[in-house]
Image (cartoon, rainbow, N blue to C red):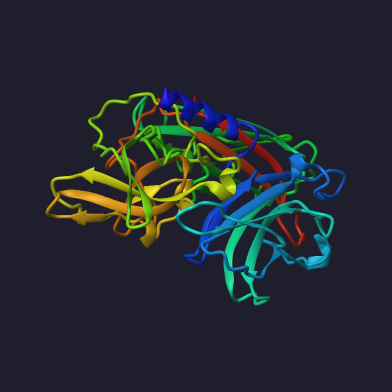
Amino acid sequence: MKRFAFIVLLFACISHMHAQTHTRTYNENIRTLRVERQVLLLENGIVDGSNPENTLHISFDEMSHDVHFYTYTVEMLHSNLLSNEYLQGFTTRDITEYDHSMNTSREYTHYRFDFPNEDMALTQSGDYQLTIYEDGNPDNRIAQVQFRVVDPLVKIDARVRTNTDKEFNGRYQQVDIDVNTSALDIRDPKEIRIVVTQNNRKDNAVYLSQPTFVEPNRLRYINQQALIFEAGNEYHHFDAFSCFYAGYGIDRVYHEMGDYNALLFPNEVAKGEYIHEFDSDGRFVVNAERTNDSDTEAEYMWVHWTLPVEKPWLDGALYIGGDIFENELSLRNRMQYDAEAKCYWLTALVKQGGYDYQYWFSGKGTQNKTTTQRVDGSYWQTENEYAVYVYWRPFGARHDRLVGVKVFKSN
């Protein structure tokens, strides 16, 4: 029942939003940065926050009850435009909505705001970065959020096949894409740029500027080696909604030295067989039992991962991957090897809720690219979420316009 409840809750909370945006924190005291939606729709030449379903809802925790002065600003990426050419209203705004945690072992303050809003609106499609900083000093940044605004001018047909140019029904999935450009005045196919992501990951994102075939009003990206993705495996998950008993994926919960701890069941190196599991493609949801508001009443817990391995891998590093660690590779999610216990381990402070995660291995010299094959394996049956983003920069234009988005499942 615990596992069923976790899955139902996780999917219910995620079903109304898009994939998580690329987020990043720069301060150890900033935790659980969350953003609902990844893509905003340009409606009648503007996105102004008047539609709650077309607005970024952003929140994070600062690990104290001290009140901090935070400000945010927004800039357009891949652009030579001045701010007044894409931003309507003010260029900065203070974050004024916050609540202190209540009845928690660790004190924290929950901050939240919506963007765009009555003070700041966007008028151009493309990629954006919202930066949050402290004490009015842009150099003292604490977090950033990358998001997109789309003006849907093209139609995208995308599909995943497991009969790839590498192997048939093996370890890979291949994406084929058709873009209908009849609404655009394209003089050179290289005006179009394609970005493809898998489960909102950064390490294996694909960037294309050359189609395979150019047809009247259609660009085709077929049989491209770059569009062959490692299929990976379904994410592991755990449910830390309770401080009193172990949820799904947790061996035991205990209180020690003023903090709650969640000891996860040890995972195993894959034995070469795909086993279907329901997951949410790397996402998480904050949730705590016996609370009226999980945002301010959920506990922070020390979560402990262990992976038994007879000997350490000397040809690279092992990480815990997923939105839980912002899909980054850093010291905070890099696992350590315990020679005495013969296992990799990681301990991290995590807010109560349900979380997906994978084991990502990054070999030496791979430039931060990772593989799941070392631990979790890779199987063509795995369900993954892919997203295709189509950008257009006509000759003489000064920014990349996002003119199409397609999000779809591989299974």
Image quarter hosting the N terminus: top left
Q: Residue at x 19, y 48 (%)?
A: 343
- Who is closer to the viewer here, 350 or 296? 296
Q: Residue at x 47, y 65 (%)?
A: 28
In the image, is 73 to the left or to the right of 294? right
Q: Residue furthest front?
A: 103
Q: Position of residue 51 (x, y in %)?
A: 81, 42
- Who is closer to the viewer here, 349 or 387? 349
Q: Position of residue 405 (x, y in %)?
A: 67, 39
Q: Residue at x 48, y 26 (%)?
A: 5
**Snapshot quadrant of residue 368:** bottom left
In the image, is 56 to the left or to the right of 373? right
Q: Position of residue 376 (x, y in %)?
A: 31, 37
The answer, for residue 106, to whether it is visible in the render is yes
- Who is closer to the viewer here, 170 or 309? 309
- Who is closer to the viewer here, 389 or 17? 17
**Snapshot quadrant of residue 71:** bottom right
The answer, for residue 21, to whether it is visible in the render is no
Q: Position of residue 99 (x, y in %)?
A: 64, 56
Q: Residue furthest right?
A: 44
Q: How many marks?
A: 0
Q: Is residue 198 above or below residue 61?
A: above
Q: Is residue 330 above or below residue 49?
A: below
